[in-house]
Image: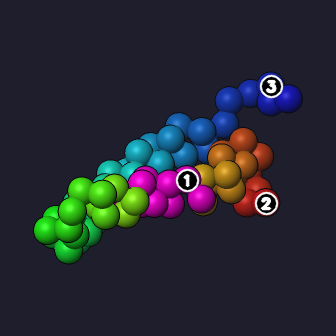
Amino acid sequence: MRETPTWRIPVGVLGLCIALAVYALIVARYVHPAISTWHTLFQAPVYLALGIVWILPLKRFLIWMETGRWG
């Protein structure tokens, strides 16, 4: 158990917020125009998948924030 605060947690949270904002802007800029003419039922799985994709590297990132190791 951690006794003292670490710089990785606030830096990690800030980095995560910035990365998610950049990811959202990329999706809004490039994916939306490509699929905006599709029927809503075809758009939904694309946005659902893109909403889940950002979670994939999150586990390793949270481990780094807590321990300082990537694995």
In the picture, residue 60 is in which quadrant?
bottom right
Give the residue drawn at x 72%, y 49%: 63
Mark 1 secondary-structure assignment? loop
Amino acid type for the residue under numbered disc 3: Glu
Residue 8: x and y in percent read 61, 44
Question: What residue does disc 2 label?
Answer: 71
Q: CA distance from mark 2 to mark 1?
A: 16 Å
The crowding category of the residue bearing disc 1, from other C-alpha atoms within 10 Å (few below 14, some 14 to 19, many at least 20), is: few
19 lies above or below 11: below
Amino acid type for the residue under numbered disc 1: Ile
Amino acid type for the residue under numbered disc 2: Gly
Magenta highlight: main SS? helix
62 lies above or below 47: above
Determine whether, in the image, residue 34 is placed left or right of residue 9: left
Q: Tag 3 or tag 1, which sits nearer the N-term? A: 3
Magenta part of the chain: 47-56
Mark 2 secondary-structure assignment? loop
Residue 29: x and y in percent read 19, 66
Mark 3 secondary-structure assignment? loop
Residue 54: x and y in percent read 49, 57
Give the residue drawn at x 72%, y 42%: 66
The crowding category of the residue bearing disc 3, from other C-alpha atoms within 10 Å (few below 14, some 14 to 19, many at least 20), is: few
**Is 49 in front, or is 65?**
49
